[in-house]
Amino acid sequence: MALRVIRNIASVFSVLLTCTVLGSGSGFFLGEFAARRWERAAQVAFAEGSAFLGAGAAFLAGPILYYAVLKRRVSFQECATIVASGFVLASLVALLSSESEIVLPVVALTGAALAAAVIRLRRDPV
């Protein structure tokens, strides 16, 4: 019983840590992309704030996605597809638009959610 509780706590901690690190890195790079035309000091400050927001969003959305949507059955390839989908979609928006700072978090989360929905539908057809 105690071993099972420890294993579940370790699993939750692992998911939270992984989501936070991935969100922080994605947020930092998306902040750099979005603010690429700014002064360097403002660009770095914006990227640092974006890293913090990315970590927070991933800390909240990641476990919901993992436990509720994908029901703990996700492979490394599927996880990488979800993360990359959100990152690539938001990166394209940042590179193609000059005023994309506000919408990037929404685009990244929407891209990841759509990829997770497609993976879930492919796995468990309606």
Image (tube, rainbow, N blue to C red):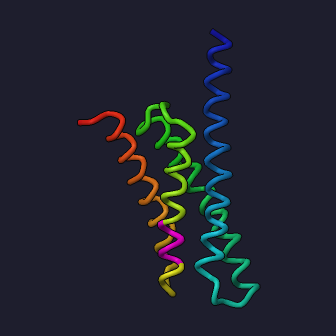
x and y, in percent, of residue 48 in the image = 71, 70
Quadrant location of the N terminus in the rendered image: top right
Q: Is residue 96 above or below residue 16?
A: below
x and y, in percent, of residue 89 in the image = 47, 66
Taking 43 as reference, is 107 left or right? Answer: left
Residue at the far top: name it.
1
**Mark count:** 0
x and y, in percent, of residue 64 in the image = 47, 42
Can you tell which quarter of the image residue 91 is in? bottom right
For this rendering, which residue is in front, 123 or 13?
A: 123
Quadrant location of the C terminus in the rendered image: top left
Residue at the far right: name it.
41
Say which residue appears at 52% left-offset and 77% top-offset.
94
Can you tell which quarter of the image residue 25 is in? bottom right
Say which residue appears at 58% left-offset and 79% top-offset.
34
x and y, in percent, of residue 123 in the image = 36, 35
Say which residue appears at 57% left-offset and 39% top-offset.
76
Name the magenta segment's main secondary structure.
helix
Taking 78 as reference, is 2 left or right? Answer: right
Specify start and end residues of the magenta stretch as a single range: 89-94
Q: Is residue 35 above or below residue 29?
A: below
Q: Is residue 91 magenta?
A: yes
Taking 113 as reference, is 61 left or right? Answer: right
Say which residue appears at 60% left-offset and 56% top-offset.
56
Q: Is residue 37 magenta?
A: no
Q: Is residue 114 above or below residue 98?
A: above
